[in-house]
Image (cartoon, helix red, strand yellow):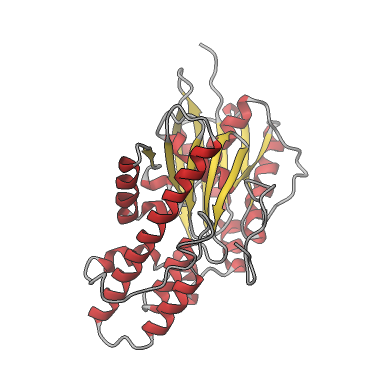
Amino acid sequence: MSKKPLILGIETSCDETAASLITENEQGLPIVLSNTISSQIDVHKEFGGIVPELAARSHVEKIDWIVQKAIDDSGKKIEEIDAVASTAGPGLIVCLSVGLSFGKAFASLINKPFIAVNHLEGHALSPKLNSNLSYPYLLLLISGGHSQFLSVKGLGDYKRLGTTIDDALGEAFDKTAKLLGIEFPGGPQIEILAKKGNPEKYKLPKPIYNKGGCNLSFAGLKTAILKISKNIKTEQEKFDLAASFQKTIEEILYKKTEVAFNEFEKENNLKEKIFVVAGGVAANKKIRSMLINLCNKNNYQNIFPPIQFCGDNAAMIAMVGLEKFKIKKFNDLNYPAKPRWSLDESAIFLKGAGVKL
């Protein structure tokens, strides 16, 4: 029996310091041996959002013991590691630099290959951590920093079908929560408050709902929430606004996903139709339920990563590292941090005022 690769993954693109070791079984399916994450919620809570310099300092303070804990939890020894994979982008450059530098130094120390990983590719492949996923598939990536529909044809082969032209969906959730007086990070609390409210109470805008293909926009919705929130006087009104926001997001995603289905099917000669949802917002149970129903209606197989792999984590980075290791796709130790790094580098940049759709 040949030795299976053992990959150390490191993630510090934003406000989680994370490390993971993974290998694979005889069938080539990944086995997560450890997945250690240190959150910085308490560091940033008083500021109502992430402060890059504080995030970077926290990474520097914790990365040594986070990596050591991941190794200890895996039951493996340092000398058994075959490669080190670190997030190189996109993200906050002061944060990326911590994990990237540590990963390079660690790889050099143990004299093993270094692999630079695109954080978005980690999310894109995260469902492989618990399913035998085959290509091609349609990916909806919804997180705090990104909202995109991508046609995934293989490792490193992505075509963007649609993207947000302003705010990411997770950002819209967090900003709405802040306007409702919910402590950072408030995005996940919206779904909880929404259960107590009337989703029909407020009629909220759906920007570019009937145009722009499967591109997305959430800035106008956020502005409407800002105006309404100034006149909220009771807890029930807060619950009603949360419910109305949740319902509006579901309606936007339902419509845009239907459009993405059509575009994906035109792009590919499909034997089976697979729809993958990844990123932190994929943990929203109401959105999951709505998208599962939509998949059933359109004969798509739906795949979500486990909840613990929806947000930022190092297991997904190690997963990409494992895939690249098997094809010997390594990187030099002078590989730079890339705060902007698209999965589809040929796609037109669509963000900001004046975007034509």
Residue 35 position within the rendered picture, expressed as x and y whole percent measured from the top left? 45, 42
* 64 lies left or right of 235: right
* 44 lies left or right of 154: left
Residue at 60% x, 63% y is: 57
Viewer-side residue, 329 vs 19: 329
Q: Is residue 111 above or below residue 261?
A: above
Residue 65 can be seen in this image: yes
Residue 208 position within the rendered picture, expressed as x and y whole percent measured from the top left? 49, 65
* 338 lies left or right of 260: right
Viewer-side residue, 206 vs 332: 206
Residue at 64% x, 71% y is: 354
Q: Is residue 161 above or below residue 135?
A: below
Residue 20 can be seen in this image: no
Viewer-side residue, 146 vs 207: 207
Residue 48 position within the rendered picture, expressed as x and y whole percent measured from the top left? 47, 74
Total of numbered circles in the picture? 0
Residue at 36% x, 60% y is: 251
The quarter of the picture where the C terminus appears is bottom right
Viewer-side residue, 346 vs 95: 346
Question: Which residue of the protein is positioned furthest toward the top in this rendering?
Answer: 1
Residue at 37% x, 73% y is: 204
